[in-house]
Image: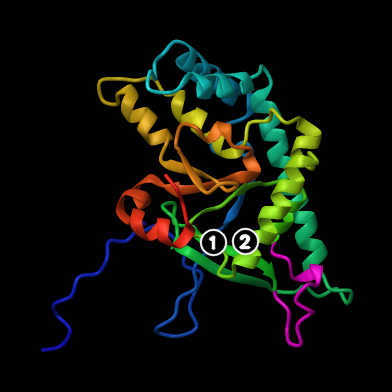
Amino acid sequence: MGITNYKLPPPSFNVSPKKDIGGPDGDTIKIEQPLRMVSCDTPEKEKPFGKAATAQPKLNKAKQHLQSGVFPLLPKGLVKYLTDRITKDAASRHINAGKDASDHFEKEKDKALNKPNGKRRKVGVLPSGEVIDRNGRMLAYVMTYFEKPLPPKNDPSRRTYNLIMVEDGWAVFFPIWPSLPKDPKDFDTIYKAAKKAWTNKKGMWNKYGAGLLLPYEYRLLMKLSVEATAEKTAKEIMDGAFQRLCVDLRTMKLVGKFDFYKVPPSHRFWIWEADWKKNKTQIKSILGVKE
């Protein structure tokens, strides 16, 4: 009869457009595939929310919505945390931090990939967790690719770029289940680096201050800046902005989606609310999360 009666699990992503750049044979195709480095999150540049002159009014609108009670379900502590960070220059500081982070990444990448003989090393890609996100990007850890024999395991040249950006303070620690390193020791390494970067105020926090809007906070506020209409209610806007639950890595206690502000950035661990509802027992068993 053949394989005709089976049910695949629902995918966590949709088909996304990719540019065809040729193929070596009839069953292989090369495409342009954007890759999202996991466990780290850098400030946004001028895309997708525009230059500071365009983005700042959006932040101001979000602040107005928060202070006027458009989203009554949000706790007062979270409202104060977010609105305190929406300063008159919040957008320009965030965008400039994004440009600096991009420059730092390019510098570190060139340092790692450029050989003394003028040739360039390849990049190693290790897909993780969901593999492809909702925006069609591959989720992965990225590092310098070395031909054998490899440098020793603890050699700094074998660090992932994900780790380097967090370690240097130009990316906030942003671990999301299930896109985690296969080896828990690697997770511990980036977690320790995140704590050190935050405590010592390295990179973006050194240059732009501890009150700098974190990348996921910036994106969240952009969603909250949208005006509620009959087609999209305030609750629907809020639900679209808050889709992740936060876990405090110090205690492994679930603090929910509205209380993440109570946890220092370097100790925040994230779980998609949809994943939690679907796989709560499994996630609790694997991670030891406590409600």
Mark 2–mark 1 distance (CA, rounded to whole Å) = 7 Å
> Considering the numbered disc 2 on the image, is that residue within a helix, a strand or a loop?
helix
The percent coordinates of residue 68 (x first, y second) are: 44, 10
Asked if residue 217 lies left or right of residue 121, the reply is left
Q: Quadrant of the C terminus?
A: top left
Bounds of the magenta span? 145-160
Q: Nearer the viewer, residue 41 or 102?
A: 41
Task: Decide whether the magenta segment is chiefly helix, strand or loop.
Answer: loop
Among the two numbered marks 2 and 1 on one chain, the one whose residue lies closer to the N terminus: 1
Which dot marks residue 180?
Answer: 1
Q: Report the amino acid beneath label 1.
A: Leu
Q: Mark 2 packing: few (<14 Cα in 10 Å), some, or many (20+)?
A: some
Instruction: Quadrant for the N terminus, please.
Output: bottom left
For the point 54% across and 61% down, the residue is: 180
Q: Please, is residue 26 above or below residue 191 in the view?
A: below
Pinpoint residue 248: horizontal percent, then vertical percent: 55, 44
Q: Is residue 105 above or below residue 223?
A: below
Seen in the picture, residue 8 relative to 18 is either above or below; the reply is below
Label count reads 2
Classify mark 1: residues with Cα within 10 Å, few (<14), some (14-19) or many (20+). some
Residue 8 appears in which quarter of the rendering? Answer: bottom left
Numbered label attached to residue 25 = none
Q: Within the magenta stretch, is there residue 157?
A: yes
Check disc 2 and report the residue beneath it: 187
**Contact between labelled residues 1 and 2, with CB atoms less than 8 Å apart:** yes
Q: Is residue 29 left or right of residue 97?
A: left
| Residue at image coords 30%, 20% | 229
- Residue sitting at 44 percent across and 36 percent down? 257
The residue closer to the viewer here, 161 or 51, is 161
Residue 168 visible at all = yes
Q: Amino acid at mark 2?
A: Phe
